[in-house]
Each structure stands twice: as C-alpha cells, then as structure tokens.
Image: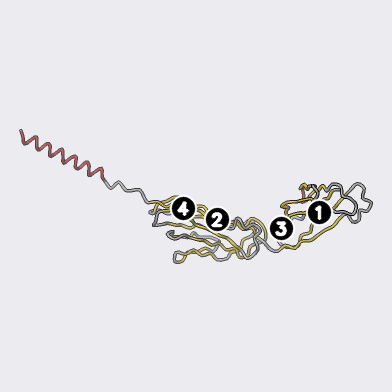
C-alpha cells in the first residue's frame, strides 16, 4: 500500500513517521510519497506528519492511498484543513568592531534584526541589556525606532515585512578595563515559531591604553651632553 500526500505552499514538512516500519520520501511540488507495506484486513496504519506553517490562514492537506487489489477506490482519498494563527520568525545578531579597545577608545556595536519567514510583524521591538561600566555615546539613525536619552537606549515597536532586515549601530566606550557583554532581544506581538534566534550576545574587551614615551630620549641626550661638557672643562682646567 502506498500513500501520496500533497502539502500546500503554506505548510512545510519537518518530519514524518509511518507505523510498522514504513517510510515517506519528499518529492517536488509539495508531494510526499509514503510506503505503508502490507495492511491486513480490518486494520490500519498510521502516518504521522510534523508540519510547520509559514503563514497564517487555512491550509488543506490531501492524501491518496493506492493498492494493487483495491476493489473500491471511491474512499481512497481524504482531505484535512488546518488553521494557523499569525506568526513571524524574527532573528537578531550582534557584532562589535573592534571587539577589543582601550579606555581611551570606543567600539561600534551593530544589531541586525531580520524577519526570516511568516506573516508581517506589526509591532517588532528590539531591546538591549547593557552592563554597568559601559557607556553608549551615540545611536546611529535607524528604522528600528531606537533612540538614546540620558545614556539609555530605547526602541519603539516597528513593522517588519517577511524578508526585511534592519540595522542599528551603537557607539560604546568604557572608563574601566575588563570584559563587557551586551545582549539584544527582539520580540513581536505575533507568535514566533523559532525562539532560539530571538536573542544574541557579544563580548567586548576593554584594556588600559599603552604608556606614552614622554620624551625620555631627549632628557637622556641632554644629560649625556652635560656630562661631556663637564669632562671637557675638567681636562681643560688641568692644562
């Protein structure tokens, strides 16, 4: 016995399982071919599909079974409809350039928010967790609604269409040496099917600036010159 499953474009197959040791193979055009093996009379064989919806709405899955000795074919097909709530797969990444700087320098931290898949996210919001000892001196112009006020970065909700990508760049510095970690999180009012990419973190290494030369070479040369003059005068006096 074989079964052919047809999936709509809005549904993606994550995994499949056939009871009794059968298997399913994905084909083109959203079709799935399953081998069910021999099914005795008055018994059944379960096919379990794990599906993911890429957009909200109603999506129908069709299945057609076939066997060489099936005398009644009018009951060989069925259809089931699924309702999916709105969802959006949002992701955020953090990068720092440079990742290591001195207390006299600064770094630019870029947060990139991406809408990977799903329905439009009407109220996507980015937020930052900044450690003590790290100052934000500037927030570049951005489309994520992020502004700087009193040293605090706040971002207003913004709409993101599927496939959209937006950046915001923070300029940071620190008067103290050590390791500082920044964390960014993105969230929306619609559900997110993949929550593992909703937060990102990056570390910054802050060190003391190298000591300056201070003109020590000139002082040494001056002392050497004075010593030479003193020796010259001493020998001249003996003559």
Q: Whole-Å distance between the Cαs marked 3 and 2?
A: 25 Å
Q: Are marks 4 and 1 in contact (CB under 8 Å)?
A: no
Q: In the figure, 189 relative to 230: above or below? A: below
Comparing 21 with 174, the one in front is 21
**Horizontal and vertical percent position of residue 76:** 88, 54
**Horizontal and vertical percent position of residue 90:** 61, 58
Which residue is located at x 8 percent, y 35 percent? 236
List the residue tagged with mark 2. Answer: 200
Total number of numbered labels?
4
Q: Whole-Å distance between the Cαs marked 2 and 4?
A: 14 Å
Q: Are marks 3 and 2 in contact (CB under 8 Å)?
A: no
Question: Which numbered disc, 4 or 1, marks the residue closer to the eye?
Answer: 1
Question: Which numbered disc, 3 or 1, marks the residue closer to the eye?
Answer: 1
Q: Are marks 1 and 2 in contact (CB under 8 Å)?
A: no
Q: Secondary structure at mark 2?
A: strand
Comparing 144 with 210, the one in front is 210
List the residue tagged with mark 3. Answer: 53
List the residue tagged with mark 1. Answer: 46
Of mark 3 and mark 4, the one earlier in the sequence is: 3
Question: Which numbered disc, 1 or 2, marks the residue closer to the eye?
Answer: 1
Q: Secondary structure at mark 3?
A: strand
């Amino acid at each position: 016995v074989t079964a052919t499953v047809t999936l709509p474009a809005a549904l993606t197959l994550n995994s499949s399982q056939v009871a009794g040791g059968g298997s399913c193979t994905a084909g083109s055009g959203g079709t799935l071919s399953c081998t069910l093996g021999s099914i005795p009379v008055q018994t059944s064989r379960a096919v379990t599909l794990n599906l993911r919806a890429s957009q909200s709405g109603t999506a129908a899955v069709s299945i057609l079974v076939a066997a060489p000795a099936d005398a009644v074919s009018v009951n060989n097909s069925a259809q089931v409809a699924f309702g999916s709530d709105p969802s959006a797969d949002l992701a955020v990444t953090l990068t720092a350039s440079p990742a290591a700087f001195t207390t006299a320098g600064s770094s630019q931290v870029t947060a990139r928010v991406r809408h990977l898949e799903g329905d439009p996210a009407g109220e996507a919001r980015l937020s930052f967790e900044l450690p003590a000892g790290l100052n934000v001196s500037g927030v570049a112009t951005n489309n994520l609604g992020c502004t700087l006020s009193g040293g605090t970065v706040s971002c207003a909700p913004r709409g993101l269409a599927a496939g959209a990508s937006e950046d915001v760049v923070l300029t940071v510095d620190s008067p103290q040496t050590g390791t500082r970690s920044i964390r960014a999180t993105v969230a929306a009012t619609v559900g997110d099917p993949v929550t593992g990419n909703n937060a990102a973190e990056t570390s910054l290494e802050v060190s003391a600036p190298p000591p300056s030369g201070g003109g020590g070479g000139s002082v040494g040369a001056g002392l050497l010159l004075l010593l030479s003059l003193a020796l010259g005068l001493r020998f001249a006096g003996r003559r």
